[in-house]
Amino acid sequence: DAGVTQSPTHLIKTRGQQVTLRCSPKSGHDTVSWYQQALGQGPQFIFQYYEEEERQRGNFPDRFSGHQFPNYSSELNVNALLLGDSALYLCASSLPSAGTEAFFGQGTRLTVV
Amino acid sequence: DQQVKQNSPSLSVQEGRISILNCDYTNSMFDYFLWYKKYPAEGPTFLISISSIKDKNEDGRFTVFLNKSAKHLSLHIVPSQPGDSAVYFCAASELAEYGNKLVFGAGTILRVKS
């Protein structure tokens, strides 16, 4: 049973560019959330997708957008990259109900230069 | 405003002894709490969770205690093993229609010495 998979694992982009990160949820999960983890900090919630719609959003600017596909996989897009966007981006999948654990992928390490 | 705080950046414990990791929260609307373990170059791995209607949950060597009046939870690992050395994150969430929006603490680095 494949867990949560993310691609790519590492990425280097130039300031001002755009980036797309991809996530496939754990089998049986239909809710996908994205988190940003800066160095030395805990993950911060970006947004959550269920039934191809954004359902919850954290305190991130509109430069961060996403999409969920009919097969439940998801993309995170970041436009106009800033140096401060350098972080580990984590995807988590879960069932669409409260009180259930989220399972995380290994993350995508984004470096903006 | 940090709603979930792990005030100890690191903890060192001898193999076989108890490890106690602590977490405080400020949002009284949180009703579900989780602990995750993270190794370098891997994503967080779910360890154990507790609902606000309970004050204790146990799973093998791991026990989580919740004190709602103090807004405090702790993770006990007994006995500690060298393979437990990792970063431990406390997370909390409110009841939400579409699943959990997790709020994480900054993590505690646990080192178990053999």
Image: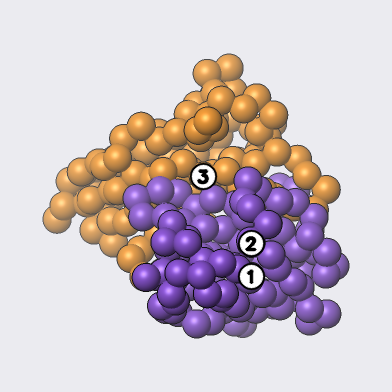
Q: Residue at x 64, y 62 (%)?
A: A64
- Tell whether label 2 touches label 1 (CB within 8 Å): yes
For the residue pair B32 and B106, the one nearer the viewer reads as: B106
Q: Are marks 3 and 2 on the same chain?
A: no
Q: Taking B25 as reference, is B95 left or right?
A: right
Where, quadrant-wise, is the C terminus of chain B in this rendering?
bottom left
Q: Nearer the viewer, mark 3 or mark 2?
A: 2
Q: Which mark is residue A76?
A: 1
Label 3 marks which chain's residue?
B
For the residue pair B19 and A20, the one nearer the viewer reads as: A20
Vertical side of B106 occupied by A93: above or below: below
The residue tagged with tag 2: helix, strand or loop? strand
Q: Quick one: label 1, few (<14), some, or many (20+) residues within 10 Å?
A: many
Q: Position of residue A95 (x, y in %)?
A: 75, 61
Q: CA distance from mark 3 to mark 2?
A: 20 Å
The residue tagged with tag 1: helix, strand or loop? strand
Vertical side of B16 occupied by A8: above or below: below
Q: Quick one: label 3, few (<14), some, or many (20+) residues within 10 Å?
A: many
Rendered image coloring scheme:
by chain
The residue tagged with tag 3: helix, strand or loop? strand
Instruction: Name the residue tied to disc 2.
Output: A64
Looking at numbered disc 3 in the image, what kind of residue is underneath it?
Phe
Chain rendered orange: B
Looking at numbered disc 1 in the image, what kind of residue is underneath it?
Leu
Which residue appears farthest toward the top when viewing the image?
A: B69
- Tell whether label 3 touches label 1 (CB within 8 Å): no
Q: Nearer the viewer, mark 1 or mark 2?
A: 2
Q: Which mark is residue B104?
A: 3
Q: Taking A104 as reference, is A100 left or right?
A: right
Chain rendered purple: A
For the residue pair B90 and B19, the one nearer the viewer reads as: B90
